[in-house]
Amino acid sequence: MSVGLSEAERIARLRLARSDTVGPVTFRELLQHMPNAVEALEALPTLASRGGRKSALRIPSRADAEREIAATEALGARLIIVGEKTFPSRLAAIDPPPPVVSVMGAAHLLERKAIAIVGSRNASAAGAKIAATIARDLAGHGFTVVSGLARGIDAAAHRASIEGGTVGVLAGGLDIVYPEENRALQIEIGKRGALISEMPPGTRPQARHFPRRNRLISGLSLAVVVVEAALRSGSLITARFALEQGRDVFAVPGSPLDPRAAGSNSLIKQGAALVESAEDIVAALDAPDGRYLTEPESFGFNPAAGHAPDPDSATRKRIVSALGPTPTMVDEIVRQTGLSVQTVRVVLLELDLAGRLHRDTGDRVSLLPEDQP
């Protein structure tokens, strides 16, 4: 649900999003447990302490948040908080949405029908050619082409669609170029297309940032097309995110002798639609059964809907005892403990803020060792 945010709430949400141990899931849980981000910020140290955190929780100051906003605007970009009317609608529909994004360039491209094209960094000449052809033709049909500005398939798709509309999703800050060989391309997309990132300016991409980038690629799109991908590749992570988000996955078949096609061929075996051209994707859009390319329903925070009384120590102990190093469904923890969903989620939130909880896919959680002083 897109709503207007007061300036105090906007700053508080940014500070909350940049606080230690607060990722998209924790951010969502906090805003569903507390009436607003201002009160959530005030509660952070207490919640983390209850979860067993012994060291101080780093919470950015208001001045830190204002500096990030100013640095983003100095780049000619806009920092947008989830809940603001200008927040990209498809990203707002994923669960959980990213708390904050920064956008440079033609922001209207984020609202058009969009298809992601991803694939191998070490692309074959044939793979790069078909990625470019599909991207150019999709742009000609009025689609925005989304990709991750990596070398290989990503770069080919961006270059071919820049005239019709392309969006580059970055793992680092908007002012950081990676890889360096794509500097001119990134600059051009910032001027003629759009760039988007979850990270503050000055953030250099690290390994842990790329899954978050991939989640944005699929989240911005109605479908993901995998052109070439090895069996263990970031493109398959993007495809997995797409399925979790209710998006469609298409794959271009490749030679069984080429390991760069092993992942895309595997997707087809698992049920991904085989495509060889943009026309295949457009035909799927026009299919009378409406199977493909449906717009996701909007996701909205419901502040304080999950509010529950603060659990006592015995309740916390029951929930912690139900956790272990093996990822367990939250619903299973509720069943084992006999406690309400709201109570279980409050304790999980406390453990998360204390750095003692690992969140896995499929609403599964596991316990990490207690924070050491």
Image (cartoon, grey):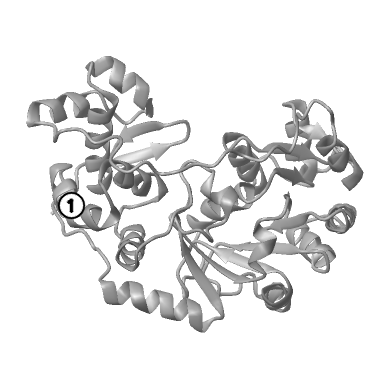
Q: Residue at x 34, y 59 (%)?
A: 13
Res. 296 image quadrant: top right
Give residue 46's position: percent from left, percent from top: 13, 50
The correct choice, above or below, for 150 with respect to 278 in the image is below
- Outermost residue on the bottom side: it is 74
Query: Residue type at mark 1?
Result: Ala
Within-10-Å neighbours for mark 1: few <14, some 14–19, many 20+: few
**Residue that label 1 marks:** 43
* Foreground residue among 335 and 360: 335
Give residue 150's position: percent from left, percent from top: 68, 62
* Foreground residue among 291 and 218: 291
The correct choice, above or below, for 102 with respect to 66 in the image is above
Give residue 187's position: percent from left, percent from top: 68, 78
**Figure disc tally:** 1
- Asked if residue 284 lies left or right of residue 85, the reply is right
- State whether residue 224 appears in this view: yes
- Asked if residue 137 lies left or right of residue 220, the reply is right
**Quadrant where the C terminus lies?**
bottom left
Q: Residue at x 54, y 42 (%)?
A: 298
- State whether residue 277 appears in this view: no
Give residue 193's position: percent from left, percent from top: 71, 69
Q: Secondary structure at mark 1?
A: helix
Q: Residue at x 13, y 26 (%)?
A: 315
